[in-house]
Image (cartoon, helix red, strand yellow):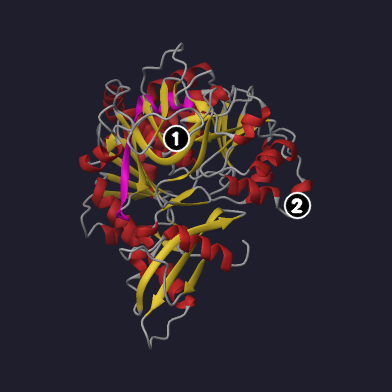
Amino acid sequence: MQDWAQVAGDDSVPLVEQSIGAYFGEVARRHPRAEALVDRDSGVRYTFEALRQAVERLAAGLYGAGARRGDRVAMWSPNRAESVLVELAAARIGAVLVGINPDCTQDELGYVLGHCAPVLVLAAPGHRGADYAAMLTAARGGRWAGDFVILDSPAWTALTEPGGAVVEAAGRAAAEVGPDDPFCLQYTSGTTGRPKAAVISHRAALNDALFIGRTMRLSPDDRLCACLPFFHAFGIVACVLATLAHGGTVVVSGPRFSAGAVLRTVQEEACTVLHGVPMMFILELAHEDFGSYDLSSLRTGLMGGAQCPLEVVGRVKRDMHMRELTVGFGMSETTSVTTQTSPADPVERQVETVGRVHPHMEAAILDIEGKVVRVGEVGELVVRGYARMLGYWDDPDETARVIDAEGWLHTGDLATIDADGFVSVVGRLKDMIIRGGENIYPREIEDELYRVPGVVEACVVGVPDRVYGECVVAAVRVAPGRALGPDDVIAHCRENLARHKVPQTVVIREDFPVTASGKIRRNVLREELAAELPSA
């Protein structure tokens, strides 16, 4: 038992000091004939040996295209087998992976490309009617001057069939990549409304993946149904790397999440592992044909990305046969998962907390003066250790704002730590909205709302939603005499914001609750809207 809310994870097992490429090569040589990757949509199946060869060819192709150690290589696509190949190929030669949201707008795409300046973008032909080639061509006329290759094109085929000399040069380059090298940039929205990019090292991603898998007791016998987006840390690290690092099989259920596709994949591929944000599990449990699927192969998984309702955790364990389900907490700035429950934990701790801190990581709860509080008291959760980001890409000021002089990363989340070291997240310091596992910051949406002719005041909050955790609600005040309705505002947002950022509801208000200084009281507005709107 302890008195103060500061804990350190077990450090008896040393960290793996290898690059991701080197470690994956070792796993592939240990399990050459085992199935490593399945893409349900395309029908492609790779053994570990076939995947290793494909990754090495693509890595050489990237090298031949000019990608070098430290250069950024972006992947813009819904989930498909090539997403995994690009992740591993970039890591092999030390190029830094940049995942781009498949639903991003032209403005958002241009910002990301201009910000991190990838030498090459590998992109699907399109998604939900968007023409990626046209969007990339338009973006190249701005701050970005790189190149792009569309998957399934002759240029993609050429990239996967490099010459012998390039293969040898890429092999030499791979030998120079180490655990301290950046592995990926994870874009995460900031208070200004423009995304920041957390820089994650090979050491952080590989060891986080290993600890996630060990907590779930992953082995070469396990098959993961992968339905989380591969542009996100949850998909890149917790799904792909954690499974492959333990010799398991990654089964891609489809290009985007579909509850029916997930249930079919679990049944037909005999999947033993299923990750997701609470919204995904809620939709799976609510599927009209849920009872007709055989999910008895499932054993474990990871639920995170948003607050996990106790009832949902219980139903997943019982009705989906995931008796060893784990619940985790993390953020892009801490690679993926920082705390996680274990199947060996008491049942009440498995459903009421987000577990203990991972090995080689520390966590503490601080008060407003930056002092550690006593166990059970609420304060800001801070973490430090190997999995903490190296910093924000090209943003030292913002890095210094969130990482203090003692190395603590301030999460902005309100939490408690009990006497046994279990962490419970109880709220947020920030105004961030978490909708279906996606972090959404009101400022970015509000900036767009102010561009709507006739809107003179706007405030965006998250209100509780049974399926998505929270839904985005915008309250706006319209200039006198302007004929502007909720549908008009939503239509504008659909044209200018990514799908997950578009308000589900727009409420026209005459006034807002304000402080003495005139600032909108978001907490009061949130309560008022939650009471006024129909129960979600």
**Residue 302 located left or right of residue 132:** right
- Percent x, y of residue 409: 34, 34
Residue drawn at point x = 41 percent, y = 61 percent:
521
- Percent x, y of residue 435: 51, 53
Examine the rendered structure and indicate whether residue 188 appears above or below residue 107. Answer: above
Could you say which is closer to the camera, residue 394 or residue 435? 435
Residue type of the residue flagged with mark 1? Ser
Q: Name the quadrant containing residue 107.
A: bottom left
Examine the rendered structure and indicate whether residue 267 appears above or below residue 244. Answer: below
**Residue 142 located left or right of residue 337:** left
Which of the numbered marks, if any, corresponds to residue 336? 1
Which of the numbered marks, if any, corresponds to residue 204? none
Q: Name the quadrant containing residue 298.
A: top right
Q: Secondary structure at mark 1?
A: loop
Name, please, the residue furthest toward the bottom. 481
Circles 1 and 2 in contact, beta carbons < 8 Å: no
**Residue 260 located left or right of residue 328:** right
Residue type of the residue flagged with mark 2? Asp
- Percent x, y of residue 497: 40, 63
Residue drawn at point x = 56 percent, y = 56 percent:
464
Which of the numbered marks, if any, corresponds to residue 289? 2
Residue drawn at point x = 76 percent, y = 40 percent:
294
For the C terminus, give its image quadrant.
Answer: bottom right
Q: Is residue 247 visible?
A: no
Residue drawn at point x = 51 percent, y = 39 percent:
425
Span of residues in magenta: 192-210
| Mark 1 crowd level (few <14, some 14–19, many ≥20, 10 Å Cα) | many
Examine the rendered structure and indicate whether residue 210 appears above or below residue 444. Answer: above
Could you say which is closer to the camera, residue 443 or residue 130? 443
